[in-house]
């Protein structure tokens, strides 16, 4: 039994909702609408995380000073950091909350689109939603996959540039040479999309585009670390 089997009740619910939407919309559009609705429901968490990330950026100079003051004294450093965050009513892990909440939904959608079901028999511009890119047999199918991957690459490039700007602006020692590869993880979604059916690629494009737009809106005028989105 797959470890994902424990998600089957939630997968069944997601299937039923998408299937109901597909009664009045094309199935691909139903996937997009369902994903947008879930992301809207998660938006308050993203707003809270944005406030936390801005507070963390504001406190970065104080953190650097405490690191200098308590160098070689990890216990005192941890106590001083905890006291500072308590006084400022901030958390060093604020930006992780949305990602952690997104993991279950990502897992449900992955299970939905990698387990045979009636939704995968529907099509997007004539291409079955259950088809993998390796199974594409004609130019029309390659075009559909190509457009989706180009969209994912475009979103990845936006995130890549934002991550590079953030990394360039980060004070030492945050901007460590060993972390220079991190911005390139923004393109990981394109690679992942090549391993899953067309339906999952539609979902990935929708959720990554939402994440990029949401982050740009919430952090307009500021530069904060880019946290890769899962859903």
Image (spheres, grey):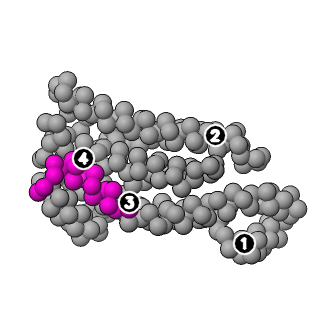
Q: Which residue is mark 2?
A: 165
Q: Please tell me whether residue 110 is drawn above or below residue 184 in the rendered image.
A: below
x, y percentage for residue 142?
24, 28
Depth check, front residue: 97 or 38 = 38
Residue 67 in view in this figure: no
Q: Is residue 160 magenta?
A: no
Question: Would residue 130 appear left or right of 196 to someone viewing this image?
Answer: left
Residue 149, quarter of picture: top left
Question: Against 185, is 102 above or below?
Answer: below
Q: Which numbered marker is on residue 32?
A: none
- Do labels 1 and 3 touch, CB within 8 Å? no
Q: Are marks 4 and 1 in contact (CB under 8 Å)?
A: no
Give the residue at mark 3: 39
Q: Nearer the viewer, mark 4 or mark 1?
A: 1
Question: How far is mark 3 from mark 4, CA to CA?
Answer: 17 Å
- Between the C-alphas of marks 2 and 4, the distance is 33 Å
Residue at (64%, 68%) from the top-left corner? Answer: 91
Q: Which residue, given by chain and number where applicable, does mark 4 sit on?
A: 199
- Give the residues in magenta: 23-40
């Amino acid at each position: 039994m797959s470890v994902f089997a424990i998600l089957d009740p939630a997968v069944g619910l997601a299937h039923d909702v998408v299937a109901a939407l597909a009664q009045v919309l094309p199935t691909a559009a139903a996937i997009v609408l369902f994903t947008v609705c879930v992301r809207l429901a998660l938006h308050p968490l993203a707003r809270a995380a944005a406030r936390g990330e801005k507070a963390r950026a504001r406190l970065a100079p104080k953190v650097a000073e405490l690191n200098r003051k308590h160098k070689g004294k990890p216990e005192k450093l941890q106590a001083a950091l905890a006291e500072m965050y308590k006084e400022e009513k901030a958390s060093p892990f604020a930006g992780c909350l949305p990602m952690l909440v997104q993991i279950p939904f990502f897992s449900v959608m992955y299970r939905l689109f990698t387990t045979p079901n009636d939704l995968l028999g529907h099509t997007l511009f004539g291409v079955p939603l259950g088809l993998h890119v390796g199974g594409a047999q004609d130019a029309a199918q390659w075009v559909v996959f190509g457009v989706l991957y180009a969209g994912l690459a475009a979103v990845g490039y936006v995130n890549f540039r934002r991550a590079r700007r953030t990394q360039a602006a980060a004070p030492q020692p945050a901007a460590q040479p060993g972390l220079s590869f991190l911005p390139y993880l923004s393109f990981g979604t394109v690679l992942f999309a090549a391993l899953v059916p067309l339906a999952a690629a539609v979902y990935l494009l929708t959720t990554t585009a939402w994440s990029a737009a949401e982050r740009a809106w919430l952090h307009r005028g500021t530069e904060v670390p880019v946290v890769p989105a899962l859903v």
